[in-house]
Amino acid sequence: MKRFSCALQSTMRAIHKVDELNWRFALDDIATITAGQGSLPKLRIACSEAEADIYLHGAQVTSWRPADTEEVIFLSDHSRFEDGKAIRGGIPICFPWFRAKADDPKAPAHGFVRTKAWQLDSIQQEQGSVVVTLSTENDETTQRWWPQEFRIEHRITVGAELKLELTVTNMDSGPFLFEEALHTYHRVGEIDQIRVAGLDGAAYLDNTDANREKMQRGDIVMTQPTDNAYLNTQSALELIDPALRRRIRIVKSGSRSTVAWNPWESGAKALADLGDDEWPRFACVEASNILGCAVSLASGERHTMTATISVASS
């Protein structure tokens, strides 16, 4: 009975928060806030150019469907939707480190901002698109793992293109170094049929092979576990998907590295929030600044990394 009472109180708090957010930010039928999975607040966008879902948890886009187009973003059916847990799929934000924290194996993988609730700052309509701005900053929970003071703003433009602008501001008294990634799970037809163009001749570190440095020859293909970090590259990318008969284009700025990842069958079995049959349905290809491309910010400085995603039939 006590557990039921706590669950009911949690649900009532979630409903109250959703009502308050709608009162402050909703735009008629274009942008509304609902109680999503796990009762987490979810922003639902439905404009003339596209539809999208964005959770305040992690400021995470979990769906984007341009008009007359199939879903572009993969979301696991086994994903956890709860405080302190990452949503598997969508576009998680990795900050201030990528993968494991080098000096603390107990720290959360990919940092801490993807597992905390962000603040919704504004929703604006711009012609056929909708612009959503969310933010987060350091607090007691972040300083347990990373003592620096910071503020992050995530500006998401939902339209015929999906534009993601991640701005980090150093609020500390001294400089700091950080890694970041917009860890995009692109929905694909069959992982072993896709190709990623745009990185021919680029050097990369292969994390499945002790981070040995290698050279990309031709397009990226994924026919085995893939975890590549392409360094010192700012080129646009094109994910070619013959099964879904489309091309996904990723244009980035303020990003000097690109990550390509799929765990394959062996790696998927180790992920409790990913179904055994889901790994062939996504490819992570993302804008980032990691490893030797980490960003150094002086006190008061800011840095913006942008990724713009578009889709065309092929």
Image (spheres, rainbow, N blue to C red):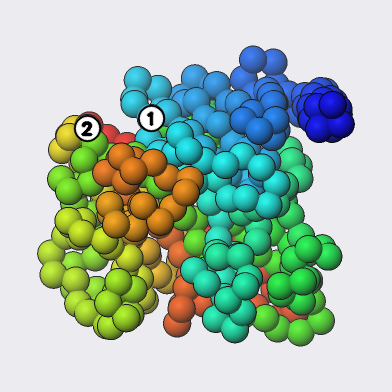
The percent position of residue 133, horizontal first and vertical second, equals 67, 43
Q: Which mark is residue 71?
A: 1
Horizontal placement of 3 versus 184: left or right?
Answer: right
Disc 2 is placed on an element classified as loop
Residue at 58 percent across and 76 percent down: it is 105
Which quadrant would the N terminus be assigned to in this image? Answer: top right
Question: Which amino acid type corresponds to the residue marked 2 in the rendered image?
Answer: Leu
First in residue order: circle 1 vs circle 2 = 1
Residue at horizontal 35 percent and vertical 20 percent from the top: 68
The residue lying at 70 percent from left, 83 percent from top is 175
Q: Is residue 31 above or below residue 139?
A: above
Tell me where residue 114 appears, x and y as whole percent. 61, 54
Residue that mark 2 sits on: 244
Q: Residues within 10 Å of mark 1 (few under 14, many from 20)?
A: some
The residues bearing labels 1 and 2 have C-alpha atoms spaced at a distance of 10 Å
Q: Image quarter for residue 6? A: top right
Crowding at mark 2 (Cα within 10 Å: few <14, some 14-19, many 20+): some
> In the picture provided, is 222 more to the left or to the right than 288?
left
